[in-house]
Amino acid sequence: MEYVRNTWYVAGWSSEFGRSLTRATILEENVVLYRKSEGGVAALEDRCPHRLMPLSKGKLKDDCIQCGYHGMTFDQDGNCVRIPGQEAIPASAYVRAYPTHERHGIVWIWMGDAEKADPNSIFDLPQFTDPKWSMHHGDALHLKSNYLNVAENLCDPAHVSFVHPTTLGNSASEEVPVSTEKDGDVIVTSRWIRDAPPIGFFQKFGGFTGNVDRWHYYYLHPPCVAAIDFGSADAALELPEDKRDEGVRIFALHFMTPVNATTTIDRWMHLRNTAMEDETAAPQMDEMFRVAFAEDKVILEAIQEEELRPQSRRPIRLAIDKGPNFYRRIVEKMIAAEKQPDVETTGGASQTAAQ
Amino acid sequence: MEYVRNTWYVAGWSSEFGRSLTRATILEENVVLYRKSEGGVAALEDRCPHRLMPLSKGKLKDDCIQCGYHGMTFDQDGNCVRIPGQEAIPASAYVRAYPTHERHGIVWIWMGDAEKADPNSIFDLPQFTDPKWSMHHGDALHLKSNYLNVAENLCDPAHVSFVHPTTLGNSASEEVPVSTEKDGDVIVTSRWIRDAPPIGFFQKFGGFTGNVDRWHYYYLHPPCVAAIDFGSADAALELPEDKRDEGVRIFALHFMTPVNATTTIDRWMHLRNTAMEDETAAPQMDEMFRVAFAEDKVILEAIQEEELRPQSRRPIRLAIDKGPNFYRRIVEKMIAAEKQPDVETTGGASQTAAQ
Amino acid sequence: MEYVRNTWYVAGWSSEFGRSLTRATILEENVVLYRKSEGGVAALEDRCPHRLMPLSKGKLKDDCIQCGYHGMTFDQDGNCVRIPGQEAIPASAYVRAYPTHERHGIVWIWMGDAEKADPNSIFDLPQFTDPKWSMHHGDALHLKSNYLNVAENLCDPAHVSFVHPTTLGNSASEEVPVSTEKDGDVIVTSRWIRDAPPIGFFQKFGGFTGNVDRWHYYYLHPPCVAAIDFGSADAALELPEDKRDEGVRIFALHFMTPVNATTTIDRWMHLRNTAMEDETAAPQMDEMFRVAFAEDKVILEAIQEEELRPQSRRPIRLAIDKGPNFYRRIVEKMIAAEKQPDVETTGGASQTAAQ
């Protein structure tokens, strides 16, 4: 499968890395990761160049890895610093090192040309550091689905009524049209469901019992970051679009890490402007998201299976597919651009202009 | 793998279908089946034309299926009747519908050209509706074997002595020659084992203790229906061929449904002219058949595995293979005929002339 | 995968074969083995030439196998002696028979041209029959690894320090150079670690507490036999190379049987010149070897997995790889020689000149 390489992918939450060796498979490459003694996370090609032994089965020695087969030792930059039984270290004795960057409890990795790895292009939100907001890191959801289908699902408000009828959607929205726009390469799909019963999520968080106005803004940053801004406010307030902070507002963030052509890890986290002092709120939200995302998992894995079977005709596209259509074209453009050696490309996600 | 398409296959017993959605894989195609509110079974392509979601994971709404991803809805004929979020329904918004027919508690499906689906060509027996006979539907036996090998086994009386020594055969028949004839495209392999000890089955049903005359008539209707007429009578009666109803006589029916190149479902049922009032007879027969067919399963799955391995020489054919040889040639002829656009073909099984 | 065919492989220990049918897969071929009534082991192609049924699922009748499907019967030479239902036995009704030879409790099989199968070329050691030595047959270790990587590991003393730090090696040897020589096609890799703490094995067997001289001689007989001569003696003795019998000396023998391109069975046994009267010594040694060889298994299976993944560059070779390099070239030469129809080849292992 083809992937955008010159972009930042999430390798894991900061809490996942310590002074032991962790293997991750990203864009079909095996990477070994560990926290360095002075902080920061090292990421190396997980294969000794001698007999192909995964370095993640070796030992961490200071900030170097000693291979578990013959003791070849590599430093955090991938340079070989020891070959037991010989003095000379040949030029071919190295492993690839991947740039990483850590911010807001998230470890990002760059799988493309190292010289293009600019931390300023990493996805960010002002709410990460805003004291009126509370941030919580969720789970790593393993999906037997390629990343394209996962991403389509994240610029597709229309599925919510049918896939998540008891958590994130209800039948009130079945026929409400979706607005789709592009902000540079960011795809924004949104809709407001005005003066309707609250969905399960906002019955619990917000305590709404009467009708509410409910919004969904899906900001999809190709290839693999999605920020979903959704919330509710008492319908009597007739809340305008730019006053969403006056309602109960949530950001659900999804960081997709393509493992291979049929597997993606979707790491999700959330930010909220409600129940700031309530320590039970984050785990309760986690639980509701787990139920909802398990519903997506069923869908995504079923269609992945079908895609691998013979196709006798082309799938059809509907009015609701404007966002997914934009997404596919942008990803194709990014992949094509990386094949042009002289063209400068940036696949990174930039800050969402969330008002 | 190639299959005969213009023929009736068994989709299941009538009892398998109700007001829920059932997936079946037949000739490598996924089909969703459900019982319609006015009766009869609908069978649709199990794949939404939008995002390939299996419709069997959706919801039955009256006699329509609503897709579980975005709510596209299809009626029992495969026509799309609703697309949430848009008015217009494009011509490409449909799924294939398969003709079905239900008779004697069996649901048949036609995987080929719908206009050729003639219910009169469905396999039938007068004993199905004869009050002197009792009918009982058995199991769906899943075999990791292609249908050709399953069918060969069902026009092959010779294997019984070696594969089923304690149930359907014994050593008395090891050297008794097999008679093989063709009645149109129906292959009839048969033999009588005269004046020999009864097999296990007829010790139990019939209560024979002394020597019996035992017969086997295998009627194989290519591609996928087999009726095995077997029975026993006291050897002293010297029963002629056309008086089999005076002995204890059983029909074991096998309906093979090819799933894919390495899997077949063998649905079996039986009819008997003995122990009509005994409610324990059918379950006891089921149990004996289960033991015997589990013995076939071991054989068929072992040879399927071998067929998938490299072959260094051609298998040899023996005198007992006359029936299987006929079968292979008829199936090849049927498949070739379906590739001739102007030639009328009928692959259906017609009524067995059981005397 | 390509294999040397004109050589003796181990089919199993003598204790593995009796009056029942055993299937073994060797060089991707299925073989059925059984002990003949007058002794000796028969080895036949495990596939009936009629319907490909594995003969190992049939029945042993005297020294013949009766196929479990239709009763075709083959004698110990692979000749068909019965076809139920017909008199004539066609010339094509046979299965291949493989030469075998049994010695020292080991059953050897020849997978190549039968006329070249010379038992004199079977690997042997004078210690097998020397009353000062005690022989013990160990386990059949199943490795998800091709035989080439298993064999490399057995002419590679350098890995011991890193893979077996608590059993067969320790850090004292990390930088001790390896001597590599060829004796005909036998590769001899060796080293002495002088005046160093004893490894775990010789703390237990030998009771050494002070420093010892320790040796390793790996005799690799391509393609698939390895004899590892290792031992220890009190460092004060300053034992010369040709007096190893005066120390505590062990032979660990490895007989690799390639199953297919990704699986090898490594049958190992050992001989010792110590603790001759101690009945607990052999099972205790077994236990230590099991721990050590499980460590090799982790390595070998991990690199096999990596070899199956895409490679972006050639593996590098180190100073310690002289033995493995010899081995690869000799196996390539043997395989190439077998493709030359007129050239006489011997792939068998000859007796090790162990002093």
Image (cartoon, coloured by chain):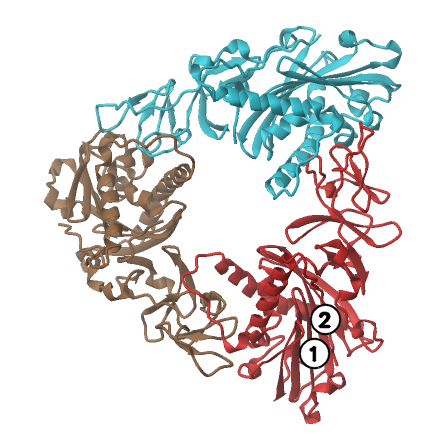
Chain colours: A brown, B cyan, C red
Quadrant where the image shows the C terminus of chain C: bottom right
Residue of label 1: C204
Residue nearer the viewer, C49 or A61: C49
Q: Is residue B327 left or right of residue A76?
A: right
For the residues labelled 2 and 1, say whether their Cβ atoms are less than 8 Å apart.
yes
Q: What residue occupies the far front of the structure in this picture?
A: C342
Q: Residue at x 42, y 62 (%)?
A: A23
**Could you tell me residue B185's position as x and y percent?**
62, 15
Q: What numbered label is drawn on residue C284?
A: 2
Disc 1 crowd rating (10 Å Cα; few below 14, some 14-19, many 20+) is some
Quadrant where the image shows the N terminus of chain C: bottom right
Look at the picture and state if C302 lies above or below C82: below
Residue nearer the viewer, A210 or A305: A305
Q: What numbered label is drawn on residue C92?
A: none
Is circle 2 on the same chain as circle 1? Answer: yes
Residue nearer the viewer, A56 or C116: C116
Q: Quadrant of residue C343?
A: bottom right
**Could you tell me residue B23's position as x and y percent?**
47, 28
Amino acid type shown at disc 2:
Gln
Look at the picture and state if B213 lies above or below A292: above
Helix, strand or loop status at disc 1 = helix
Helix, strand or loop status at disc 2 = helix
**Could you tell me residue A321's position as x and y percent?**
24, 36
Please indicate, yes or no, whether residue C68 appears anywhere in the rendered image: yes
Q: Earlier in the sequence, mark 2 or mark 1?
A: 1
Amino acid type shown at disc 1:
Lys
Which subunit holds the residue at mark 2? C
Look at the picture and state if B294 lies above or below A80: above
- Between the residue at mark 2 and the residue at mark 1, the CA separation in whole angstroms equals 9 Å
